[in-house]
Structure formats: C-alpha cells, structure tokens
Image: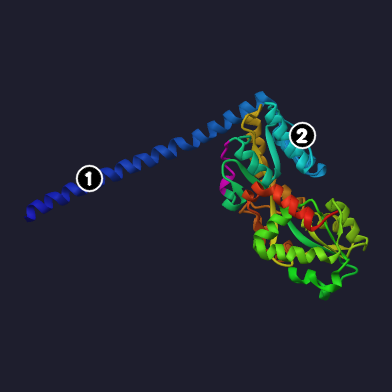
Amino acid sequence: MVFRMSIRKVAKSKTLAVRHFVLQVAVLVVLTFSQPSLAASREDLLEGAKREGQVVVYLSMNVEESNARNRAFEAKYPFIKVREARIDGERLFSRILAEEQANKHLMDVVECQEFYLHTFKKRGILGYYLSPEDRFYPKEFKEEGYWITAYLNPYVVAYNSKLVSQKNLPTRYEDLLKPEWKGKMTLEPTKADWLAGMLQIMGREPGLKFMRALSKQNMMVRPGHSLLAQLVAAGESLLDINMPASTANRVKEKGAPIDWIPVGPVPGIMNGIGIASKAPNPNAARVFADFVLSREGQKMMQGFGRWVARSDISQEQVGRSKGATIIPVDPALGEKFDEYIKLLAELFPR
C-alpha cells in the first residue's frame, strides 16, 4: 500500500511538473509575441490612416477648444487632416438620423451628448471599437466598445459673487424654494438632460414635487448658457440653477463677478466619442478617438476647464470641484428624452 501510494505521488509530481512547464512555455509565447503583435497592429492602423488622409468629425464642441485640439492632433499625426461638421445639440442629432435614413455615410467620428450616443448605438450607427484607452474609464462613464466620455458637464448653481454673500448662498436644493429667491433666478429651459439627471438624483416623484415647487419661483427662463452667465454677471439675475460649471468658469476668468456652487449631488452630463459603423475613414477615426481619450488629449480637456472621467488624471481636478459629488446621468434615460422635453416645457414655459 505504501509503495503504491509512493508511485502515485511520483506520478502526480511528474504531472504537476509537466503542467508547470507547459504553463511557463505558454507565458513565454505570450510575452514573446503579444507586444510585437500589438505594435504591428498599431503600425497597420497608422498605415491605413495615412492612406485615408483625413477624418470627418461631427461634434457640438465650441470652436476655440476644438480648433486647439485639432492643431495638437495634426501636429502629432500630420498625415491626417481633421474635417469638422460643428452643429449644436438637437440639430446634430437630427442630421445624423437623416443621413442614416438617406443611406449617406459621411461621418467617421461623432462627439456629442450621451443620450444621443445611446440612441446611435441602438440604431447601429455606432460601430464596435475597444480603444486601448478604454481601461482608464470606469464603466459608468461609457457604453463599452461603443463610446467613452470625452468630457463631463456638471450642472451647478451659478451666482453673482458681488451681490450674493457667501453666508446667504443656498446649501441644498430645497433652499432654492425660499421666498428670498423668488423672481431672482434664471433657468435654461431646453436642458432636458438636466431634468433627467435631477430626477435620477432625487427620485422621480420627490424630484417632480421639487420641480413643481421651483416653477412657482417666477424664474426668468432664457435659452443659452452663455447668455444666462452674462445676465448673472450683470446682476439681472442673482442665481442660475442649471449652468454647466465650465460656462461659469469661462466668464469668471474674464473678470466677471460670477461663481458657482454645488447645492447637493450634481448631474454630470457625459459628452462622449464614438466611431461610425460605416465610417469612410475607419483607421483615421480610431487614431482620432484614441488621441481624444489619451492622457494627452484629456489633459487638454482639463486645460479647457472641462471635467474628465479618465481615472489616472481625474483626481487632479478635485481641488476645483468645490466638493461637488458628480453623478453621471444614466444614458438609458435618453430613451425617454421626448418625455423629459415635454415635462420641462410644462414646468418652465418660456
């Protein structure tokens, strides 16, 4: 019995040794061939992009920022010319859907608001591409393989820093319902994404109850965040309750008396980037998307005063976030976008 057990032990030991050897060989093969393979793949991508020579980007980003980014991209990849169709919000969404219906394939890359990207993904307008930068983005900031957040727009409360003292600032959303603010606030009435995010944060029924109470505060309702920032800075409004922090910051940097605060968790609207499923220049599209999502590209976005989701640099913006808890808005809420547009119009008619 002892002898038989010893044989079994020896046999088992040999089997384990063989398995260990096979595993070592497999690891060696992976280490030997994976990196050259990746390098070759990148070389093929760049060679394909050189042949294509251009990338067509549909976006709604402001012209100063996109031009600066394009210059940096073309300096790094001089063989790819960036051509843009810069269109605001809903018109961009409508144009892309119209082109799809007409079977026109002009777009390589789209960079826009998350709700639109979610719809494009469902309709097959976005193609699958897992960028090598994907690993740096938490799952709540992307629809993996289809789009990733290029920058965030946190909606905050802006105020006139000359006319409103720190001690009188609201510290929670319910403070906006106080009589002292009646007739002294503004609101952008087209931002259904803001309403969707607020109802996500507050819960639908409590959120609607709050919005109905807020609608009785006789707010000035005007479209255009830049206009509203100017109205706050001029003292025509003391507070604006749904302004992107970056908008307030840009006006503040020019010396205007405007600043912003979070008065609770704030909805963060994601502006993401994805590649068209039938992109005419697919290689150049991938190179461009990778650049935007890279550490270099995201540092540029931070330099523009934007919030980013890339994990290895997101901590660098903590100092200017003023303690804000930014809640990424669920992209699937875009499936009810028409409902939020209608709700917003009913609550805050122009």
Query: According to the image, label 1 marks what residue?
Result: 15
Q: Is residue 114 above or below residue 80?
A: below
Q: Which residues are magenta?
A: 128-135
Looking at this view, is 136 or 267 the one in front? 267
Query: Which residue corresponds to the image point at 75% horizontal and 58% vertical from the top-left?
Result: 155
Task: State yes or no: residue 129 in magenta.
Answer: yes
Spatial CA span between label 2 and label 1: 62 Å
Question: What secondary structure predominates along the stretch shown in magenta?
Answer: loop
Badge 2: few (under 14), some or many (20 or more) residues near its Cα, within 10 Å?
some
Task: State yes or no: residue 50 in magenta.
Answer: no
Q: Is residue 255 above or below residue 65?
A: below
Q: Is residue 262 above or below residue 79?
A: below
Looking at this view, is 145 or 296 the one in front? 145
Q: What residue type is disc 2 on?
A: Glu
Query: According to the image, label 2 marks what residue?
Result: 84
Colouring of the image: rainbow
Residue 48 place in picture, x, y as percent: 62, 26
| Label 2–label 1 contact, CB within 8 A | no
Q: Label 2: state its secondary structure.
A: strand
Farthest top residue in view:
51
Q: What residue type is disc 1 on?
A: Thr
Q: Is residue 74 visible?
A: no
